[in-house]
Image (spheres, rainbow, N blue to C red):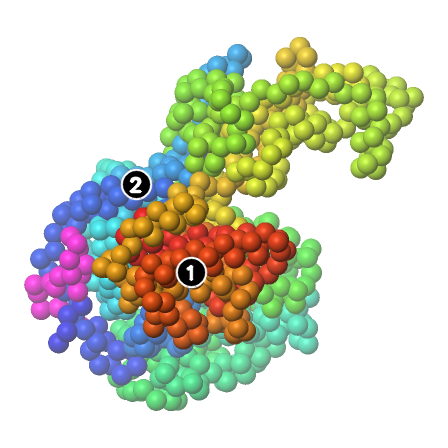
Amino acid sequence: MKKAQNFVLGDWVEGKGAGIPMYDAITGDVVALSDTEGLNFEEILNFGRTMGGQVLRKMTFQERGNMLKKLALHLTKKKEPFYELSYRTGATRIDSWIDIDGGFGNLFANASLRKLFPNQSYHVEGDPIDLSRGGRFMGHHIMVPKHGVAIHINAFNFPIWGMLEKCACNWMAGVPAVVKPATNTSFLTEAVVKEIIASGILPQGALQLITGSARSILETVDSQDVVTFTGSASTGKILKSNPRIINESVPFTMEADSLNSCILGEDATPGTPEFSLFIKEVRKEMTVKCGQKCTAIRRVIVPEKLIEDVQIALGKELAKITIGDPRLKEVRMGALVSKDQVIEVKDRVSELAKTAEIVYGDFDKIDVLGGNAKDGAFLSPIVLREDKPFENLSVHDTEAFGPVSTIMPYKSLEEAIVLAQMGKGSLVSSIVTNDDTIAKEYTINAAAYHGRILILNRDSAKESTGHGSPLPTLVHGGPGRAGGGEEMGGMRGIKHYMQRTAIQGSPTTLTEVTAIYQPNAKYKEVPKHPFKYHWEDIQPGMSLKTHKRTFTDTDIINFANVTWDHFYAHTDITSLDGSIFEKRTAHGYFIISAAAGLFVYPNKGPVSANYGLEECRFLRPLYHNDTVYVRLTCKQKVDRDVAGAEHPSGIVKWFVEVFDAEDELVAIATILTMVQKRQETFVEITEGKIKECLSKLTEKSNANWGTLTPQLMVEHLEFSYNLYAGNTEDFEIGTSDKILEKVHATLYNYDKMPHNYEFPLAEKSKISKTIHSSLDEAKEYMLKARETYLSFVEENPTVLIKTPVFGELNRYELYLLERKHLNHHFEQFGLL
């Protein structure tokens, strides 16, 4: 029998024991054996800390985010085999979509968070804090990656999502992971990890996998590690109380199963959209993943007068559910993960049934479509009804982790809130109501007991992700029984794997430490205007002091007329009595505009656009005849992704300080500019450079890739120049309309052209057969064709030329194409 492998210490290894069988939930067949005997967990953790940790910690947030994005794109292309394997866990296509695509979605979502972090390996959190009256001693907070590993102990129900929603956060933080999935479904986790490792995208040691029992793994954790656990509350408490966890003060995040509730608002009576939404939501949460979700609805809390209506309507909805082999398109609910889990759920239902009545479903009567009804882990949805939820407390203490929910009544919203609270803490609660007053009262009073609250009504229904769907940008976790932990939550989830440290010092020193200019730090005077520098060359603290300008009455009145801002302080000096103003006052936005006029460099350069304004404060009024000057200082640099037809660029935040003639600070602002990155990939193409390269090209020159001979390459370039000059017969653009815009935009980036690309007009350009008598003749014709092209675009500056790959190009885009194209072919023959 095949054994599931462990990926540890940089290699795939099998355990040395007999192994524990993992079963197909649909047929009962053995899928594989799980075996971890012989693994040295101390070595595994140390390997992650050293090999993976050292590399990840040195990477910037931008590099880590791009790594996650690349991994997500790779896995998305390879996902179909995971779906086939997922069926063996009992999951339907929809169930698997939540697990597989949802897991990859976490990678995408966390990758996008790189835009919120600085372009460095650590994070600067919050605002600076002045710790002195003179402004020369201050504090700030930084967050650095922990030097340990993230140990993820996951549940069986989401073998992919459970791993990636956590790993996405620790990788973004710069921390490696050791993943220990639940044994039952670890064969699916193994398949995904094999694809991750084969991709080579992660650095060695960033991910290790243990596919079976690891009872002693916590015995070797240290204070720099982070442990996360998803599973039953009872198991979580045992792990959390491990002496090593306590003695080393290891952060332990527990996300435990909870008795989540869904409340039907009193306004949501039969016939309303909300009543239908409520029934469908409960049905969905009972049947998706066969109710094996830590966020599933366990307690259905409804107005006393509507309990019969809810019971009947829910029964009708559940009766439509076809149970069986999830590969069949008719099947809407698959199987539980194992026969053992079926026994566990039945035992819990029996406990609940001591006081509650089973009003839908039967353990002994279940119709199965496909699959093996005897050996598979199938179970009918079970609905119980507890009419005395304030007396019979089992419904608030006992969870059946399967397709099981209990309906219970309430007489008032206050009672509904109390009932929800009696679950002693849950991951999620929801309320279905179209009355915002009810929604507010429930939310405010119930929030302390729940990690997330969904308010569902007719307005949000179409776009709602549902009661049971945790999202990467929102916190996942809950108080009390739910474990008291947090996962995901956007930046919050990443920070969980980082150490927050308070730092103190002078503004100048902390500017260097944080790479963010701190107020009152020393300025860095530069020989050129800051707007003349490319993004890579700009540094925090780089500063410019402008010349002065005096505001006049005419300036203020003209600004009022241009903007239509006729606020009395600017235009009616007879109304100033009792105000804070003494005389005609300059508009605040005029001050900022005038400041820009003082510091903006007018000529074309690396600064390509104004990107916005982050903060603006006016510290005192400025009047006509007041004189000001500006201090422009680089505050911070933020990397950005380029979308569309624009050159690679980053954002520079500039700290703008406006001073009066007495050097008193009167206004501050932070403005953002888009600054182009320096182009260092391509050699600029000039006539001299072309002739220099062609002089090196001989008939004996060998290509580094492709099939072109030296002469064929030169003749191909001649054909291209003829095309750029509009001298080629009509042709169809070879790039699909679906991706043409994206392909066209690549002209603006600094990436080289791909090797061995098949030119769409190869036959028309006779690229496989020479047309000139010699290489030297071909060179002459190519240079003449270039002269013709340059003359053509000089005489026709607004012309658009159709190209076979990039579509229609203007004059500037033709220049970009020529630069890329010639660099590509000259490198092909080693001429550059």
From the viewer's perspective, is 296 left or right of 587? left
Q: Quadrant of residue 730?
A: bottom right
Q: Is residue 533 left or right of residue 413?
A: left
Q: Is residue 504 visible?
A: yes
Other-residue count near label 2 (Cα within 10 Å), few / some / many at <14 / 14–19 / ≥20:
many
Please report the bounds of the magenta region as a residue range. Answer: 5-21
Q: Does any portion of residue 106 appear in the rendered image? A: no
Residue nearest the observer in this picture, 307 or 498: 498
Q: Is residue 12 magenta?
A: yes
Crowd band around label 1 with a 10 angstrom C-alpha radius: few (<14), some (14–19), many (20+): some
Determine the CA span between mark 1 and mark 2: 54 Å
Q: Residue at x 68, y 12 (%)?
A: 661
Badge count: 2
Residue 564 lies in the magenta-colored region? no
476 vs 519, left or right, is left
Q: Residue at x 29, y 54 (%)?
A: 697
> What is the three-letter code of the residue carrying label 1?
Tyr
In the displayed structure, 164 sits above or below 610; it is: below
Element type at mark 2 = helix
Return the residue at label 1.
781
Mark 1: secondary structure: helix
Q: Earlier in the sequence, mark 1 or mark 2?
A: 2
Give the residue at the far right of this rendering.
Answer: 574
Residue 222, image x, y percentages? 22, 40
Q: Amino acid at mark 2?
A: Arg
> Where does the N terminus fall, quadrant-wise?
bottom left
Q: Nearer the viewer, residue 47 or 119?
A: 119
Whole-percent x and y of residue 825? Answer: 35, 57
Which residue does the numbered mark 2 point to in the structure image?
57
- In which image quadrant can residue 61 be found? top left
